[in-house]
Amino acid sequence: MIKSRILISGGGTGGHIYPAISIAEKLTEANKNFEILFVGARNKMEMRIIPKYGYKILGLWISGLNRNLLNLKSIINNVLLPFKLIISIFQSILIILKFKPNIVIGTGGYASAPVLFSANLLQIKTVIQEQNSYPGITNKILSSKASKVFVAYENMDKFFSKQKIIFSGNPVRTNIHSKKDGFEKALKYFGLNSNCKTLFVIGGSLGSKEINKSIFSILDYLDFLNLQVIWQCGKIYYDDYKSKVNNVNIKLFDFIHNIDLAYQAADFIISRSGASVISELSIVGKPVIFIPSPNVAENHQLKNALYYQKKKLAFLVEEKNLKDQLPNLIIEIFNNGSVLDEIIQQQNQYSDKNVYKNIDHILKEITDEKN
């Protein structure tokens, strides 16, 4: 049997990387004859994470526009950006010509644009997996040539052709789904006390300066509540906070690979509101405080969080209100069992644990060389 070759491109942050991994996992689970190759951005986190899942990845010389114009390095990066884009397109063309994919899947990130653009030039079928409620300009442009656009939110025909949209939900890693022995295993893994409640803080895969500052400022308050904290602070902030935090109830990490165990251990969670982590948390079924990043394209994290807040699926605190609102909200969640039960019940009703059904079906259709 001739193998169907699938090229997947996405990265820069976990919000683009893990949906790509999830799609690859489900495709190989459904059909062992799928040969999968990833393409990412050189020196970005996907180049470290993807191989840990057993997939090959190639890196392009590409980066995003840096908005910090006061930094010389950022200015140089922005000047080089057009050259990087042209070179990354040539790199993508060479990769596609050599790999000969039946289809190219884009999940967003720096590398996704030149790869999908090159695939369209070479008349290779492309599909887009849009995680957010408000897509970026790149996916809007690339969607004109895509065969299908997989979305996780309603009313996305404002941005994409209605005929191309597949409402599939966001892909979620298989290890996120609840396991019967998950809680005990998680407590042991993190060295937690089963008699104390646990807060899990995750400021995105790269960490969050403002969330870290806010959590650090209320550590005494959390200790007063007898709360244990699993805190993913990010690689660039880890050494600084490691030198400051000496409370045994604070479990500090730069990055948590076994995030499913952190979800299992937590009684409630503080998180950014990227689409990927939102989808994971809706499956986990734990009370969540979303703190959207204001430094993202189209302010899509706030839009994501507002969508879930309106459906009473989560709480929302904007960064500008952290100092005033976060401590009060934590105590409200800590003490109010009825509010927590309502949130969890709503999440269980809303969560779609079979989001891959349409993705598997459609991808089989469009990767079938007979079609």
Image: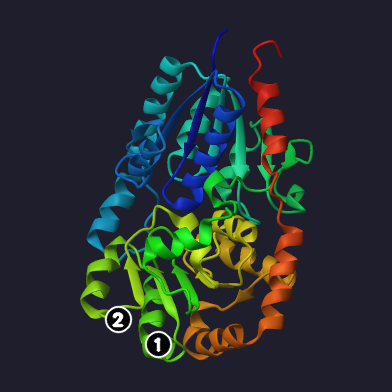
Q: Is residue 238 above or below residue 82?
A: below
Name the element at disc 1.
helix
Q: Is residue 190 left or right of residue 357?
A: left
Image quarter hosting the C terminus: top right
Q: Residue at x 43, y 52 (%)?
A: 13
Residue in the picture at 41% in, 48% down: 12
Task: Look at the image and tell me in which quarter the N terminus lies.
Answer: top right
CB of mark 1 within 8 Å of CB of mark 2?
yes
Give coordinates of residue 298: x percent, y percent. 57, 61
Residue 204 falls in which quadrant of the image?
bottom left
Q: Which mark is residue 223?
A: 1
Location of residue 125 in the rendering, given as x and y in whole percent from the top left corner: 61, 24
Amino acid type shown at disc 2: Asn
Residue closest to the eye, 87 or 313? 313
Q: Position of residue 368 (x, y in %)?
A: 66, 16
Q: Is residue 356 above or below residue 227?
A: above
Q: Please rate how many residues cluster around mark 2, counting C-alpha atoms within 10 Å: few if below 14, some from 14 to 19, many from 20.
A: few
The label number, if any, that marks residue 354 in the structure image: none
User: Picture quarter containing residue 59?
Assistant: top left
Residue 180: x, y in percent?
58, 55
Residue in front for this viewpoint, 224 or 100: 224
**Where 47 falls versus 227 (above or below)?**
above
Q: Secondary structure at mark 2?
A: loop
Tell me which residue sits at (69%, 66%) in the image.
307
Q: Residue at x 35, y 82 (%)?
A: 216
Give me the C-alpha separation between circle 1 and circle 2.
9 Å
Residue at which label 2 appears:
247
Is residue 277 depicted above or below 267 in this figure? above
Which of the marked residues, 1 or 2, is nearer the chain's N terminus? Answer: 1
Q: Amino acid at mark 1?
A: Asp
Give the class, few, some or many, for how many residues have Cα within 10 Å of label 1's Cα (few <14, many ≥20). Answer: some
